[in-house]
Amino acid sequence: MYGTAILWPTLALVALVYTVWFWMYVTRIGHMQAHPPGPDDLSTLGFMRYSQPVEMPANNLRNLFEMPVLYFALVPLLLLFHAVTSVQLMLAWGYVALRAIHSVIHGRKGPVIARFGVYLMSCAVLLAMWVGLIFDVLILR
């Protein structure tokens, strides 16, 4: 058992979320300073057009609250059931690394196919973690 070692990749994922959040606000504030919004830019549709050049960080932040929610739900269960194994820990670090790679590709406006491939790999790793927990709790105990 590796106990609370699962918290290290979890904290790394939290750090990634805050890094993307910070990037989003720096990018938006810079855009607003360089291009002050006019009255038409403050309507819903106007703001969507106005902020479009700096929406990539916001899109990436939204991505970090989709599938990663399942990771954040899994970690307490792994701790509760004392199911943190070396395999789960390796998968957790792999998941976090893939999410970071996804964010870098997204942030650099890299190819969608590369970003999607990394996304799919991260989903597969997360699924493996869930299957591992289910197997450990329901079958081995």
Image (tube, rainbow, N blue to C red):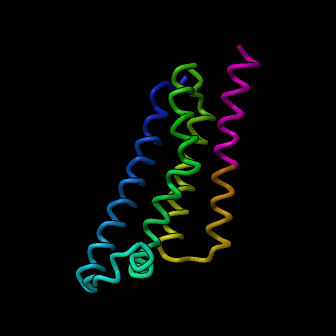
Quarter of the rendering occupied by the N terminus = top right
Identify the residue at horizontal 35%, vertical 66% (top origin): 23
- Nearest the viewer among 84 and 78 is 78
Identify the residue at horizontal 58%, vertical 41% (top origin): 70
State the image coordinates of residue 134 (x, y, percent, origin top left): 70, 27
> Magenta segment range?
124-141
State the image coordinates of residue 62 (x, y, percent, origin top left): 49, 58
Q: Please, what is the dominant secondary structure of the magenta stretch?
A: helix
Quarter of the rendering occupied by the C terminus = top right
Name of the residue lying farthest toward the top: 141
Identify the residue at horizontal 61%, vertical 77% (top origin): 111
Please say if 56 is above or below 82.
below
State the image coordinates of residue 28 (x, y, percent, origin top left): 32, 73
Count up the numbered dots.
0
- Nearest the viewer among 9 and 86 is 9
Please say if 129 is above or below 36.
above
Is 4 inside the magenta-drawn segment? no
**Quadrant hosting residue 49:** bottom left
Is 128 inside the magenta-drawn segment? yes
State the image coordinates of residue 65 (x, y, percent, origin top left): 50, 51
- Nearest the viewer among 36 and 39 is 39
Please say if 84 is above or below 49.
above
Please say if 81 is above or below 84.
above
Identify the residue at horizontal 59%, vertical 49% (top origin): 67
Q: Is residue 60 left or right of residue 41?
A: right
